[in-house]
Image (tube, helix red, strand yellow):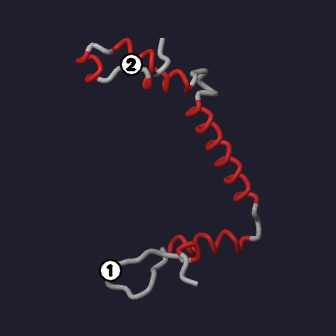
Amino acid sequence: MSSRLFQFGEEIDGYPVRVLNERAVRAAAGLLLLGNFQPTRWFVLIFLLDMGVQGAAQRGVVTGESPTVEADAQRCQVPAFAKALGHEQMWKQHHHCP
């Protein structure tokens, strides 16, 4: 099975096999051998909370901004060719812009 999903390591010129970062492997093994998974649980919890807040901020939930307002503003920008032809109002009407 040569699927990229089940491959580990990086391909580095000059090495015939994929190479792993030894420091990362040792750190992961050390955490697992401690037997205390509480630090890992805290890390995962903080990571997920941070990702949730960032995602909400990007969607405008936290800041109160609506992503559709920005999208409408971009969608309703009249291109230069329509302005040059004098069709600015027709272009806005066609794209349902105010």
- Where does the image place residue 14, in percent across and percent down from the top left? 32, 84
Question: Residue visible at 55% across and 34% down?
Answer: 58
Q: What element carries label 1?
A: loop
Q: How packed is label 2: few (under 14 Cα within 10 Å), some, or many (20 or more)?
A: some
- Where does the image place residue 76, in percent across and percent down from the top left? 43, 20
Residue 5 is left or right of residue 49, and the answer is left
Question: Between residues 18 and 23, which one lies in front from this camera angle?
Answer: 18
Q: Which of the two discs, 1 and 2, sits closer to the camera?
A: 2
The numbered dot on residue 13 is 1
Which residue type does callout 2 highlight? Trp
Whether 2 is drawn above or below 68: the answer is below
- Where does the image place residue 29, in percent across and percent down from the top left? 64, 74
Which residue type does callout 1 highlight? Asp
Q: Is mark 2 on a helix, strand or loop?
A: helix
Quadrant housing residue 56: top right
The tag earlier along the polypeptide, 1 or 2, is 1
Where is mark 2, residue-wise? 91
Question: Between residues 89 and 75, which one lies in front from this camera angle?
Answer: 89
Quadrant housing residue 1: bottom right
Whether 98 is drawn above or below 77: the answer is above
Whether 30 is drawn above or below 48: the answer is below
Question: Residue visible at 48% across and 11% down?
Answer: 98
Q: How packed is label 1: few (under 14 Cα within 10 Å), some, or many (20 or more)?
A: few
